[in-house]
Image (tube, helix red, strand yellow):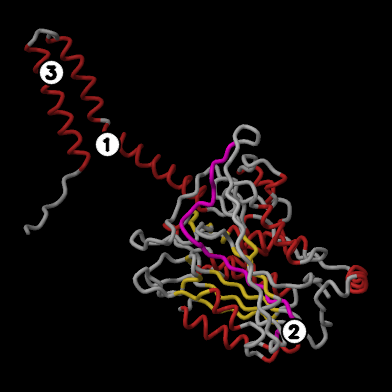
Amino acid sequence: MADKGPQEDPIRMVKSITKNFLEGIFDDLMEKNILNGDELRRLGEGVKLIVNGTESLVDDVTEKTEMAGKIFMDRLFNTKRQLRLKSHPENEDDESENSESSSSTESENENVENEDEQKAGSLQALAVPPTESGSENEDAKPEEHAGLCQASVLPLTAPLETQASRPNQKLKLCPPDLLHRLKTTKADEIYPVMEKEGRTRLALIICNKEFDYLRNRYGSEVDILGMQDVLENLGYSVVVKVNLTAPEMETELLQFAARHEHRFADSTFLVFMSHGVLEGICGTKHTEQEPDILHDDTIFQIFNNHNCQSLRDKPKVIIMQACRGRGDGTVWVPDMGKASACRYDHTLPCYIWSDAVTKTHVEKDFIAFKSSTPHNSSWRMSTNGSLFIYQVIQHFKEYSWCHHLEEIFRKVQRSFEKPSVLAQMPTIERVSMTRYFYLFPGN
């Protein structure tokens, strides 16, 4: 193939095209006696002025375009100006949040904001490249991987607020008198809480951000910091593992379940953040042709009463941030009283067995909180983390001092109750807890 010659000066090219185009028009006008010589001369002087001004015109447009581009990029990628996720949408109008309220919120606590900026600086090596900014479905991925969800650009009118765009809310502590009253009046209804001295609570966070074949999960580093911070403030020593295949995740779970500290702990947390499918959590090598999936059953089996006796009769809380399909989790329904919806009611037969050998339930004291309903998507801001994890963190900080865990999870669900631009409904699943689990922060 022949080498390309030097490119022609674009200004000269514009002038040449304009000149040739206008000369053709003028020839036609003269030929048909539409213009006489004097009229053509005056018109030619005006055209000459336009053509000679082309270079300065292009320079002006280029300069203004650069300025407009800088303003647009600053508005788009400045996390302090991004549109926000409401922490309590049941009390606010979906359209009420805007950049002005964002600015007023930022000015409330300058010291805390500076502290947040220092934390954000430590994550710069993990931060999202500018070309990837925006919002993503939790399973945003290359198009050829069917079964996982596509990336989606967040409409600029979405009322979203994220961890990095508001002052850091502190964990509210439980007053000693409330702790004493609950332990006294509801001793048979709540899980026992060990004293701080000698207690060795552990929590595990597994977060997959970088994948061999799926899109990287930008923003997940914010989720790690937020969950680690709130769990540590709740009294847990947090183990963080990142970018694991499904077999590696299983190995980490087995090692964590075997930790001797669980003998002197009253509970544990397992937090998973990754791409996902209906069957479970995706490892870093997942493809549709060669699945790399950690199944839910594997997690429950590792920590059941047969395989992890150190956590027997103790709450085991599983939190999962991942898609479970490609659906958006919404449906159009008729207003009440206008049309009746059909409902099919079918009662299944119930079978009961008795096993006199079993001393305890194999699976007990579990609760799983997942970011979406089966077959549907979860959402994550590529610079500021997941909507679900954010709400979990904020509700722990706000309500764990006085509400038990299931009620906190229900409050998180209510924050997603009204579908807006990004719809998802967290679900509480596989609950085998027989008592109320209070976290009693500060105690």
Q: Amino acid at mark 2?
A: Ala
Placement of 345 over or under 180, stated as above or below: above
Where is residue 372 drawn, in percent x and y? 57, 59
Give the structural element (helix, strand or loop) at label 1. Answer: helix
> Quadrant location of residue 433?
bottom right
Q: Is residue 128 magenta?
A: no
At x 69% / y 89%, what residue is drawn? 357
Where is residue 6 drawn, in percent x and y? 14, 52
Classify residue 82 as left or right of residue 88.
Answer: left
Where is residue 434 drawn, in percent x and y? 76, 73
> Quadrant location of residue 318?
bottom right
Q: Is the magenta region chiefly helix, strand or loop?
A: loop
Q: How many marks?
A: 3
Q: Return the residue nearer the eye: 238 or 128.
A: 238
Q: Residues within 10 Å of mark 2 (few under 14, many from 20)?
A: many
Placement of 338 over or under 278, stated as above or below: above
Using the rendered image of the protein, determine whether residue 351 is visible from the camera's viewpoint.
yes
Q: Return the residue nearer the eye: 329 or 219.
A: 329
Q: Which residue is mark 3?
A: 26
Mark on residue 55? Answer: 1
